[in-house]
Image (tube, grey):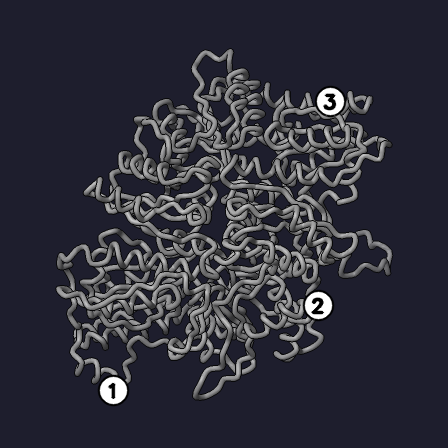
Amino acid sequence: MLLRHTPKEITERSALVINPAKTCQPIGAMYAALGIHGCLPHSHGSQGCCAYHRSALTKHYKEPINAATSSFTEGASVFGGQANLLQAIENIFTVYEPEVIAVHTTCLSETIGDDIKQIRDKAEKSGVVPNGKHVIFCNTPSYIGSHVTGFSNMVKGMTEVATNTGKKNGKVNVIPGWVEPADMEEIKRLAALMNVPITLFPDTSGVLNGPLSGEFKMFPEGGVTMKELRESGDAIGTLALGEWCSADAARSLDTRCKVPCKVLDMAFGLKATDRFIDALRIIAGTSVPEEINRERGQLVDMISDAHQYFYQKKVALFGDPDQLIAMTEFLVSIDMWPTHLVTGTPGKKFEKRISELTAHLPYEVNVKTGGDMFLLHQWIKNSPVDLLIGNTYGKHIARDEDIPFLRWGFPILDRMGHQYFPTVGYKGGLRLLEKILGLLLDRKDRDDSEIQFELTL
Amino acid sequence: MAIQNKTAQWTPAEVKEEMLRKYPPKVARKRASSILINEALSNTTPEIQANVRTIPGIITMRGCTYAGCKGVIMGPTRDIVNLVHGPIGCSFYAWLTRRNQTDPGETGENYMTYCFSTDMQDSDIIFGGEKKLKAAIQEAYDLFHPKGIAVFATCPVGLIGDDIHAVAKEMKEKFGDCNVFAFSCEGYKGVSQSAGHHIANNQVFKHLVGLNDEKKPGQYKINLLGEYNIGGDGFEIDRILKLCGISNIATFSGNSSYDQFASAHTADLSCVMCHRSINYVADMLETKYGIPWIKVNFIGAEATAKSLRKIGLYFGDQTLIDRIEAVINAEMPAVKAAIADVRPRTEGKTAMLFVGGSRAHHYMELFNELGMKTVSTGYEFGHRDDYEGRHVIPTLKVDADSRNIEEIEVEADPERFAPRKSAEELKSLEEAGFEFKDYKGLIPDMDKGTLVIDDLNQYEAEKLVELIKPDLFCAGIKEKYSIQKLGIPMKQLHSYDYGGPYAGFKGAVNFYKEIDRLVNSKVWGYMKAPWQENPELSATYVWE
């Protein structure tokens, strides 16, 4: 057994986290920053943070992830990191020539209290930031929140460049939340089908799902441009997908630039996608094209066709709040039974939303915010499930307990496809169902006796 | 930037100039000393700058001290609960991310699949985290009752002044049956992972080595230092040692156990694989317990044979020497057959190696066996002695960054010190050409005019590939895909791209096949679509 020391009996833990269902803020900020065109993320801290984040993102995307670091030494930790950051900004603009540097902090620079805004202003005044280029930043103390918080903070940081000229530009801001490049592409496709002009940020499509063509571009074609970010202050409204990932940025635009906003769930599954499409329709005052109706109908068709295999199958899930809320609603909508849910990310609303979504189910749902996978595993040992959904770190539980395992979330270190095939929208819903069905039926084909073994399912 | 066809042959001096051209003057000056055009001098090695600070903003391959300590050295220790005191990220990123295989058996203790953290919150940063750390150690003890609990400091721990050593000591005394010890391996210390190796090894030496005096069974007892069992390398080395009748008492730290460390002082010879990460432990084992050490290398079939013979010669027992020859004779035919198959497709190709503190040197052996030339190489966190040889050690300057890494003073153990060889025996071995505690470094094995580059960064890597166009580039995961985007195959030599083992005889065969696959993969011919190669519409379409 891989997790041979995990006891079935659950004991209270107040200080020790075992097998976390979260990581720290800066990696989220780095991922978000990669969704700006021509941006080099910069980690203001020890070089290990940057190395770890780059490694984790690289393993997930199988793409180059470039980011710089202030490479703190003990001296910088004592005297402050200003000199390191100023030197870094100069070196980065000279050597790599990005359009923008997106600085995020670390527990180190936060603990010593470096003032990034002051350092940034000093860099601008001293002329190390070339004309027309930018340094944006956000604070991402690793000891608060999680990687999701860091993502949200960097997206909020992006909105600080937005300006309100007083003249609306007719566009809708869409903040997709922490989703895959393929998902971002799918959101843009849906908006285009709806004929709604949107500004999507961050947008990692075209950045982290690039082609292999014998050329290396440090800054690929994709990403939201600084110009688009500036103009997001003149949008007619903002749709923020995901309370944890996207709401702060949307509210900041509302406060700063009077761009009204609506916070929706992430567009995973039938109902959440319905609400997203409906919101786009109403904002833009347009009608939903037949193509989208057809895609929706296909998803409903598959739910109907395969319903018998989904019906009352128990599911354990771990990951990030916005994703889990949308996924729970989707599972419930196809009559699967989400049974145990854990997120490492704090936020009381999570347990409340899950309880609401599962209120009508005839059993007690285990849900914990700020929980870990050790607890999830113990829950599973006490009440087994038919399917496990989460990032790659679930594979040890899946193997030990012999549970079909859907890799979904971040990070996925051992499978491919998430870069290229969306799970948002109706098409994404189809892909999720195809994957879930495949797992359940592979399991059935493996477990059925020779006598029961079926050709047609 | 596209890889153009070879139009010009760049001289090494031109390549170096190109690499430095775009840098601000201060950066160019600093980097110039880390880029060496090898001179292949006959009686000395040229000097290279190494183990110096990384330049802020220059995209480095390096990680931090914590990574070197928790990730590299302590990562493979399966029966110690490795508890990280800090915000969640540090423990998360070191969770199963190095490929240290371990064999705990069906029922043995194995905590490597677990990630333990105190998950410090802002209140812990403000009010101090010692209370939480104590509680976490207690919870780990109550849940698992391990033999040992190791505590690792992350950046904020040092800054807020949590005394992790005092907490560890207190809990150790409280438990009585669990060894609790701590590592001050904050990420900002030192200039690279290397500082973390040092901090880890010092604490292992202080808190674990020497605890078990029980006599282990077997003959020809050795320690294998600096072998981390990536992809099962250590298993292959152990297989060969066993065939030879050599007993491996302790591996530092691949597939290790608490008891192996505790018994390391009972071995009669220390064999050092990774010189960078552990040579000082070999020295300490000699000073405190009287165990001599030699440098070995099990990467490359010839190097493996040579290392085995060296061990045989040390023990000097003809039975052992004969058995080693028999093993080499039995293993070599498969190696030679593989080389004969692969070499026609790899002969004359070129490789670049930028990895680790020893691997960049060791893997040259395997490329030599394939008839491939290493045209440029360097370490990520090596020191000058890893490049130039141990003779430079007395001349190395202690700078501000190395001063804060603890050096422990070791003296002969009053009870356990026992010279394994008499002074005369050592002398006669040395006179016969046997080299104790010797390592000549990487530079002497590089040809004249090749480039040796310390702490290569993203920009320089791209330039090197653009100008020299090697057939293969070897580094780590962060470098992999930007190199491959250029159409050049890239082999990860930290994680082995999830393959391996590459050590020993069977590992060598695995490596030959892998390199054959990489440099001859069809995919590198698919970069351009037909219409990109011939864009002109010069003829009308010919229908069938």
Distance, label 2 to label 1, CA atoms, is 54 Å
Residue B432 rendering spot, x and y as whole percentages: 25, 86
Query: Is A122 situated left or right of B82 in this image?
Result: right
**B468 to B123, vertically: above or below:** below
Residue type at mark 2: give it.
Gln
Which residue does the image show at 13% across and 59% down from the upper left?
A: B215
Residue B411 can be seen, yes or no: yes
Residue A344 rendering spot, x and y as whole percentages: 48, 32
| Secondary element at image label 3 | helix
Residue type at mark 1: give it.
Glu
The crowding category of the residue bearing disc 3, from other C-alpha atoms within 10 Å (few below 14, some 14 to 19, many at least 20), is some
For disc 2, the marked residue is B4
For disc 1, the marked residue is B431
Q: Which chain is indicated by disc 1?
A: B
The crowding category of the residue bearing disc 1, from other C-alpha atoms within 10 Å (few below 14, some 14 to 19, many at least 20), is few
Distance, label 3 to label 2, CA atoms, is 50 Å
Dots 2 and 1 on the same chain: yes
Query: Is B312 situated left or right of A69 in this image?
Result: left
Q: Which chain is indicated by disc 3?
A: A
For disc 3, the marked residue is A279
Residue A73 rendering spot, x and y as whole percentages: 50, 58
